[in-house]
């Protein structure tokens, strides 16, 4: 079993392992959110499935799940507007955002999100920001995919993301959480997580 370093660095796999509890809780939350969205549209079969509504339902249910786990967790939950989610486990602050084209979305016009993406200090308590994005989307072999990345600036809508690094996360219900690095084979850390395009500035 891999042992995370006591002082996490910017090496992507170390960071992902250090945040494994936070990532696990997020996965469980959006797994519930996916089920809630499917139930909603199954109850209204005459209505066309709307990916924006599905994403909002999933985000809302995921935040409820995270709120239920937060009191006993090693991380803290900060609730943002439009059912937005920010998770904090020192020294990291993690925005949970819906993926765009399989990767992190851009910051849009939000000043707060732009500052977050640029790693700007928002207070004296966080003079050396370590801001990360945990992006999610429905799809893939398990029906839900996550990725972790560190932004290093802002980018235009539909433009290439400006990232310091990106860490894909793979989950198998029987094998747990796995990480792939660039040009590397899959690494299995044995964590059991349990069971569309969208305008960038619309929602957190």
Image (tube, rainbow, N blue to C red):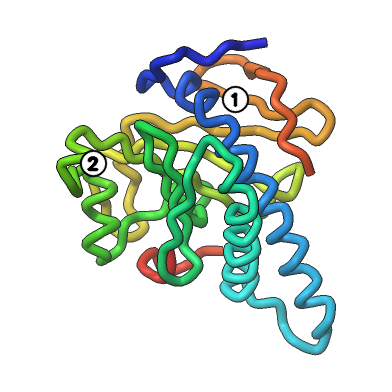
Q: Relative to residue 177, is residue 114 depicted above or below?
A: below
Q: Is residue 202 visible?
A: yes
Q: Does 173 sit left or right of 89 as displayed?
A: right
Rendered location of residue 187, percent (x, y): 63, 17
Q: Does 44 sit left or right of 6 as displayed?
A: right
Rendered location of residue 44, percent (x, y): 80, 85
Front one among 66 and 106:
66
Q: Secondary structure at mark 2?
A: loop
Residue bearing the label numbered 1:
179
Name the image quarter holding residue 41.
Answer: bottom right
Q: Does 28 sit left or right of 71 as displayed?
A: right
Front one among 50 and 66:
66
Q: Residue at x 18, y 43 (%)?
A: 121
Quadrant assignment for the C terminus: bottom left
Camera-nearest label, 2 or 1 = 2
- Classify mark 1: residues with Cα within 10 Å, few (<14), some (14-19) or many (20+): many
Front one among 114 and 155:
114
Q: Residue at x 50, y 24 (%)?
A: 18
- Classify mark 2: residues with Cα within 10 Å, few (<14), some (14-19) or many (20+): some
Name the image quarter holding residue 22.
Answer: top right
Q: Is residue 100 visible?
A: no
Residue bearing the label numbered 2:
119
């Amino acid at each position: 079993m891999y042992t995370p370093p006591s002082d996490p660095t910017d090496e992507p796999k170390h960071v992902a392992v250090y945040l494994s509890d936070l990532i696990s809780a997020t996965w469980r939350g959006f797994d519930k959110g996916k089920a809630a969205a499917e139930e909603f549209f199954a109850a209204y079969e005459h209505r066309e499935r709307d990916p924006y509504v599905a994403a909002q339902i999933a985000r809302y249910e995921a935040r409820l799940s995270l709120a239920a786990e937060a009191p006993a967790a090693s991380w803290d939950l900060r609730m943002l507007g439009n059912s937005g989610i920010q998770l904090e486990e020192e020294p990291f602050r993690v925005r949970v955002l819906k993926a765009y084209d399989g990767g992190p979305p851009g910051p849009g016009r939000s000043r707060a999100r732009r500052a977050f993406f640029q790693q700007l200090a928002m207070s004296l308590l966080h003079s050396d920001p370590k801001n990360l994005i945990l992006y999610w989307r429905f799809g893939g072999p398990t029906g839900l995919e996550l990725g972790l990345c560190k932004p290093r600036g802002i980018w235009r809508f539909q433009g290439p993301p400006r990232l310091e690094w990106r860490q894909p996360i793979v989950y198998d219900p029987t094998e747990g959480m796995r990480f792939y690095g660039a040009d590397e084979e899959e690494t299995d850390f044995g964590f059991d997580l349990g069971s569309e395009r969208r305008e960038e500035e619309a929602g957190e």
